[in-house]
Image: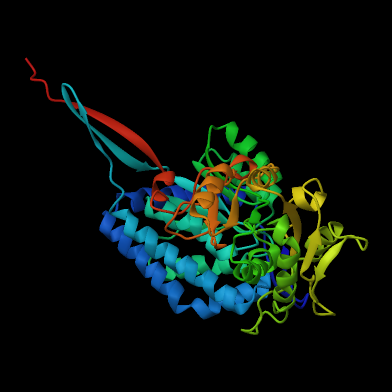
Amino acid sequence: MHEIINPATEEVIATVPGTTPAEVDAAVARAARAQTAWAALAPGDRARQLRRFATAVDEHLEELAALEVREAGHPIGNARWEAGNARDLLDYAAGGVERLTGSQIPVSGGIDVTFHEPLGVVAVIAPWNFPMPIAAWGFAPALAAGNAVLLKPAETTPLTALRLAELALASGLPEGLLQVLPGAGPVTGAALVEHPGVAKVVFTGSTAVGKQIMAGCAAGVKRLTLELGGKSPNIVFADADLERAAATAPGSFLDNTGQDCCARSRILVQRSVYDRFLGLLEPAVLSFTVGDPTDPATQMGPLISAAQRERVRSYVPESAPAAIRGEAPAGKGFWYPATVLEGTPDDRVAREEIFGPVAVVIPFEDEDEAVRIANATDYGLSGSIWTRDVGRAVRVSRAVAAGNLSVNSHSSVRYWTPFGGFRQSGLGRELGPDALSAFTETKNVFISTEETK
């Protein structure tokens, strides 16, 4: 049994049983049976069922958001967006069902066509930082492409996933098609990764665990998508709109209390405007509202757990050169204040993913040095570039080794554009117009037109 704890109050709000390897085996068998019938449906019928699921999510949006607040500590405004994002992903994926077309390739002696065949049973191992949206990143396109899905939520945040599965059934999806299997990663997760009946694994989480899953999938040459860690740069050039860059910077590393693989936790500022930028950044950070997640005015809630808070603290010793330090509620809850440090590219806080409301500000001299510092990491997930020079924006965007970059913005994720990382930030792409194809195999068929004699 896993106790589910409200991060804002430290109260136990539920207990959820873990799924044993034997139960995983039975779930795979159920999923395989459901998938065969699901894939045989006419594309229009499959799309209609997914839209009904999306409607059910929309009708229960407030309930799902409230669950997210309780189990993850997210501010209610963020949680409503997350529930809406799961709904939108289902709608978007439903639109792709009837557009999952193959190709007709010119060849001699006949015709050649390709088909996108569903993989079968897909395992989606979702994280605790964005439980609903990232689960839907996997299950929405996988279902749309004709697969069955076994969703393993994080141990700390299974409640929204369990409720989504109930809504799927109530909206008419076949029993066994979308199953939620709570449990510990080394038990339930490992059983899914190793099961011969699982055709693909989609994992979002730490790079260390991603490497273990990749090794586990190798034995069966299993298809795999990984969305892993990040240490994203926020590059501010002297010619940028400094007021806007400073005003928006707090949200880029404090949203979700910094528990975001896309967090811009390295703020690189051109030296000639470094002091001015820090002066503008301080009031913006200090005005970021921290408090009760149920209050619509709250912008930042608690960290997910006491263990995560201790991890964040380990990066900010009492002697750390904090340029800016905010406040956090006292008493119960896993609170940590917004913190901005000054540092160098070689500092631990500039190299490792913290996953908390901490950023480090680093000066640079010119464009070449900004790119060198930005790329001085094992990761390559996201980042921002602030400049009024369009040519520089293009040059730096091409030079920074990251999968998702924004110019004069901190936007990283839109369900209609591809998302994924370079280097140790992941493998493959999610979302966007090709999302369904990632859950299919391409089958090539040649039909001879030569006359039989």
Say which of 116 and 394 sits in front: 394
Left or right, residue 47 beside residue 450: right
Residue 45, given in percent of the width and then of the height, sits at 28, 60
Residue 418, given in percent of the width and then of the height, sits at 46, 51
Q: Residue at x 47, y 46 (%)?
A: 121
Q: Residue at x 53, y 72 (%)?
A: 81
Image quarter in which the N terminus is found: bottom right
Say which of 226 and 23 sits in front: 226
Q: Is residue 56 above or below residue 89?
A: below
Q: Is residue 113 above or below residue 353?
A: above
Q: Give the residue at the far right of this rendering.
A: 319
Q: Is residue 5 visible?
A: no
Marks counted in the figure total 0
Image quarter in which the C terminus is found: top left
Q: Quadrant of residue 360?
A: bottom right
Residue 257, given in percent of the width and then of the height, sits at 70, 68
Left or right, residue 211 beside residue 327: left
Q: Quadrant of residue 251?
A: bottom right
Residue 243, given in percent of the width and then of the height, sits at 63, 71
Q: Is residue 258 visible?
A: yes
Left or right, residue 206 beside residue 310: left
Q: Which of the colour schemes (rainbow, by chain, secondary structure, one colour) is used? A: rainbow
Say which of 108 and 219 sits in front: 108
